[in-house]
Image (cartoon, grey):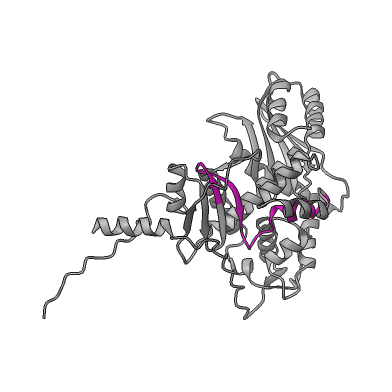
């Protein structure tokens, strides 16, 4: 049983290379919780912007008639990884966990596995 | 005949800051505790932070918690009957272990930002604040006033970007038939299925047990895609005025009057 803050803290402290994490409602684009980030990396802005990424992908899947659900999305930058993991809240809203990793320190497979575990603990 | 010089009435400087409610900003600064009643909703403040919000335009915490099977309706009704307000009822459920804390926190924040969006909507009447020690910070997260204002502004901008005409926000909705309809998401289909010429966006949100703002997002997107419109000739549903729960002297208004008289 974990509240939002505990789960985000765990993501930031246990996932190697994590520099920021946010729990985002993707209809409104609002970050329901953030941890980490920096002055030059505003997680609230990143949260709102990434809802468009998810929406675009969902619309494409709808147009292709794909029935599967998105589990996660990985974006690789030259020096960072951005990982988005989708989940459903009991309030009926689509949510996603957004994780920013420093690519020189992160272990991608491990991070993906850990994020999945944190999602399971998070009783949203 | 003498002509008396009448000094101009003081007007609020519109350019000064972008605060949605200067009164709310002041209340946050003085760390006030009490209830702010505005035309479209009510904000409960404890030590200058928003602990709870309610609006007739948005579904309350009880609806959000029970609509998707998170909690049995009977359990909510029982808790609500034993307590004075939705946050207290939620605390009771938390103590009895009927609700996981994460789910409750999120539903609470969902309901707070949703009602806050409507409570802070432009209004035609001044807000009233009642100092009161009932609101208190509980185990549920509270929100700083600036965060609520920032989020409300962001939401307004988001709706404006999706479709700039607010007509469909409050009027009964009708379906429209575009020549080449774009595919809908399941969420949008659920909204469109409930468009019947009578329901407003708020009515659809209540029916679906979704936040009203989220429904507005879908409604504006559907309006932009030409799938629905405000019913022609329909007078926008006048928002039911929130019942002012107080009979005691309006201290905030008296203070403003005193300040204005002193400034003469």
Of the 4 image quadrants, the one containing the N terminus of chain B is bottom left
**Does residue A30 appear in this view?**
yes
Query: Which residue is pictured at 63% across the width and 40% down the height?
Result: B138
Viewed as shown, does residue A124 lie left or right of A68?
left
Viewed as shown, does residue A21 lie left or right of A109?
left
Viewed as shown, does residue B101 lie left or right of B252?
right
Of the 4 image quadrants, the one containing the C terminus of chain B is bottom left
Label tally = 0
Tell me residue B208's x, y (percent): 77, 60
Query: Which residue is pictured at 20% across the width and 69% down the height?
Result: B6
Residue toward you, B225 or B54: B54
Report the magenta residues as a range: B44-69
Q: Quadrant of residue B118?
A: bottom right
Tell me residue B49's x, y (percent): 53, 43
Residue toward you, A49 or A63: A49
Query: Which residue is pictured at 72% across the width and 26% down the height?
Result: A10
Determine the residue located farthest toward the left in the rendered image: B1
**Does residue B156 appear in this view?**
no
Query: Which residue is pictured at 41% across the width and 56% down the height?
Result: B252
Tell me residue B10's x, y (percent): 30, 61
Tell me residue B55's x, y (percent): 61, 59
Q: Is residue B24 magenta?
A: no
Residue toward you, B184 or B76: B76
**Up-down: is B112 above or below B232?**
above
Determine the residue located farthest toward the right in the rendered image: A67
């Amino acid at each position: 049983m974990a509240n939002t803050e505990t789960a985000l803290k765990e993501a930031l402290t246990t996932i190697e290379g994590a520099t920021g994490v946010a729990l985002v409602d993707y209809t409104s684009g609002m970050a329901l919780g953030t941890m980490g980030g920096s002055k030059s990396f505003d997680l609230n802005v990143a949260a709102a912007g990434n809802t468009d990424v998810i929406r675009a992908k969902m619309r494409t899947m709808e147009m292709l008639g794909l029935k599967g659900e998105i589990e996660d999305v990985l974006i690789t930058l030259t020096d960072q990884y951005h990982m988005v993991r989708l989940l459903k809240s009991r309030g009926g809203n689509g949510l996603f966990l957004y994780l920013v990793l420093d690519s020189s320190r992160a272990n991608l497979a491990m991070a993906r596995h850990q994020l999945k575990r944190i999602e399971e603990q998070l009783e949203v | 005949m003498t002509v008396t010089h009448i000094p101009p009435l003081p007007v609020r400087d519109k350019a000064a800051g972008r605060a949605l409610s200067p009164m709310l900003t002041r209340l946050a600064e003085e760390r006030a505790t009490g209830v702010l009643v505005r035309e479209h909703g009510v904000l409960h403040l404890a030590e200058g932070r928003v602990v709870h919000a309610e609006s007739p335009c948005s579904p309350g915490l009880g609806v959000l918690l029970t609509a998707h099977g998170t909690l049995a309706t009977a359990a909510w009704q029982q808790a609500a009957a034993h307590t004075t307000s939705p946050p207290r009822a939620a605390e009771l459920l938390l103590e009895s272990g009927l609700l996981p804390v994460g789910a409750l926190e999120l539903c609470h924040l969902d309901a707070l930002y949703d009602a806050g969006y409507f409570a802070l909507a432009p209004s035609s009447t001044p807000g009233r604040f009642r100092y009161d020690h009932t609101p208190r910070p509980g185990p549920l997260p509270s929100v700083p006033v600036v965060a609520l204002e920032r989020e409300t502004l962001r939401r307004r901008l988001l709706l404006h970007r999706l479709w700039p005409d607010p007509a469909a926000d409050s009027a009964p909705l009708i379906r429209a038939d575009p020549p080449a309809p774009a595919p809908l998401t399941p969420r949008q289909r659920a909204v469109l299925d409930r468009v019947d010429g009578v329901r407003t966006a708020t009515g659809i949100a209540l029916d679906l047990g979704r936040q009203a703002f989220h429904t507005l997002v879908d409604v504006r997107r559907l309006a932009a895609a030409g799938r629905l419109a405000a019913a022609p000739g329909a007078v926008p549903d006048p928002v039911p005025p929130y019942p002012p729960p107080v009979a005691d002297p309006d201290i905030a208004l008296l203070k403003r009057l005193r300040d204005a008289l002193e400034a003469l």
